[in-house]
Amino acid sequence: MIELTSLCRTFMLGDQAVHALDNINLSIQSGEYLSVMGPSGSGKSTLLNVLGLLDVPDNGHYLLQGTDTTLLSETERARYRREHIGFVFQSYHLVARLTARENIELPLVLAGVAPHERKPKVAAMLAQLGLTERADHLPNQLSGGQRQRVAIGRAIIMQPKLLLADEPTGNLDSQSGSDVVAILEQLNQQGITLLVVTHDSALGQRARRRIRMTDGKIVADEQDAAQTEASHA
Amino acid sequence: MRSADLLRFNLQLLLRHRFRSLMILLALAIGVAAVNLLTGLGEGAKAFVLNQFSLLGNETLIMLPGKKETSGGMPPITGEAPRDITLQDATAISRLPGVAAVAPLQVGMAEVRFDARVREVVIAGTSHEFFAIRQLQVQQGQTLPALELDIASPVAVIGSNLKRELFGNGPALGQWLKAGDRRFRVIGVLSGKGQAMGMDMNDVMIVPVASAQMLFNKAGLFRVFIQSDDSSAIPAVKLRITALMQRRQDGVADITLISQDAILSSFADILSTLNLAVSGIAAISLLVAGILIMNVTLISVSQRTAEIGLLKAIGAANRDIQTLFLSEALLMALLGAAAGMLLSELGLLAMRLRFADLAFHTPWWARLLALSIAIATSLLFAWGPSRRAANMSPISALQARGNS
């Protein structure tokens, strides 16, 4: 599903070049559950941004479902993000003036889906996430766990193939954190490709495939046998 | 994004930032209201002035002594010229074909006395025809009698204001007034007419032209009003009068002829230009509102940086982001303009109630002008900030503080 070949991304910090991604080669199959770990500045966030089409590599190729995304225009990349990629952020990034329902609905609105088609989809999503009761609350009236669940609902309402999570439990207490992880893993079991970027080794170890990065390079890539999947769910 | 969704999204934004929205709407509303109010007042004043002149009727010519070539500079509206127009000239003109009526006019100031009351008033020496040409009516008594122009009959028709000041509620008809060193018997009182061509007809005293000439000891006429049978005959009558006066004034024709059309069109030109200038000044206030919009859009962009990053992450292209910010500005322009128009209509309504004889109406061009300037400045000044928002890198935008 994802094919990265000799991918490079360099930032200039003052007059010093920082190689956030240094010749990355990575292949991800559809339905995989990956974690990316590494110290700060190891390039894992840049990898996430490039995979999410928010950032463009300086060099190399990124094939997403057979399309070379490095050749796409800005508008086409936006369409790909909308249709194929979901984001979950550490700080939720909910729009404060919109209710939980409206936040989840937002991608559908941007995509120009008709209101009568949006309604049942959003209602089903709210029910699936156990948020029906809180649907008309504003983000500041919700708990952290509820906010992250709204954010997940927004990320998957367009039924993307790829879900990118950047420290999804970073701002949550352990109970809400494990709830959120359970939802993400359940989505993965339903077939979504899940990539989690984290500092938290407990969370990182849950993934079937664990990538470790240092200084913009992949230094470890461990994979469990596919059959042991049940013990981690 | 569907337009209905875009509208809803922006309305939510306006409601959420109530104070900010209110300030912009106010600035826009004041700008639009200023354009509408000022042009409305200007148009009202213009209509009033033109109406005053059109009382003259378009089959009337005014003859003034002197011409540009002999007096130099301005047309000789003061009545001072090298060659006088005499009563005999007026009589000769009245015999020309196509001329229906001629009314000479001699004007001066004199003290008018009745018992112990004295007033300094304008005295107009003219003839019976003057009343028909200027559409003057009497509320009591009669107009000047139809006499030969050179008969100085001691009679007077006075304005309603003058009548009240000199006689109070007592009878005026048949009373003798003293004007200068001559005595006049009041034979009529004008009905109220107000200001007309710079002369307050309520304060005037009208006497036969020959009497006025004696009173002021002056032979030359100030004006001659000439009424033709028909407005289409005016050019021909003009030519005949010029030819006649040329003969009578030793080949020079030292006169100026003015028709109502000429006066109306030059006044309309002046007033329209003035009106346009005033609305231009008002339009500047809209430009100021535009700069306010630019600042507010800039603030909005920086406050909503994280939201812009998010919208990009969930699939909004640069173009979509720009549309969002531009439509927000457009919505504000439309709402502000609507509020401004409402405001100006209410203002003009109040003015109409206060000054019943002035027709204050904002012309359609001014409304369109105000609306389009409001929209154009909003879009123009929101363009830069919206471009900035659209071109933000989604990654750094997401790292900005804000949103929960």
Image (tube, coloured by chain):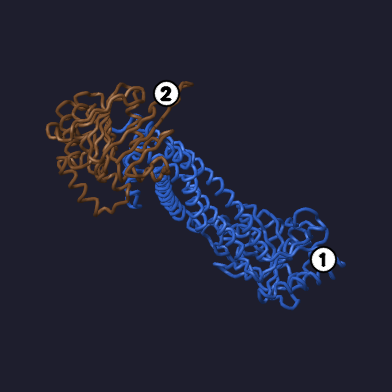
Chain colours: A brown, B blue
Relative to A161, residue B142 above or below = below
- The image position of residue B382, as x and y in percent, is 46, 42
Looking at the image, do the residues carrying marks 2 and 1 touch, with CB atoms under 8 Å apart? Answer: no
Local SS, label 2: strand
Q: Chain of mark 2?
A: A
Q: Residue at x 28, y 54 (%)?
A: A114
Image quadrant occupied by the C terminus of chain A: top left
Determine whether, in the image, residue B197 is placed left or right of residue A196: right
Depth order, front residue of A55/A123: A55
Residue A161, quarter of the rendered image: top left
The residue at which mark 2 appears reads as A18
Depth order, front residue of A100/B95: A100
Asked if marks 2 and 1 fall on the same chain, the answer is no
Determine whether, in the image, residue A199 is placed left or right of residue B170: left
- The image position of residue B38, as x and y in percent, is 52, 50
The residue at which mark 1 appears reads as B253
> Looking at numbered disc 2 in the image, what kind of residue is underneath it?
Val
Image quadrant occupied by the N terminus of chain A: top left
Q: Residue at x 58, y 64 (%)?
A: B190
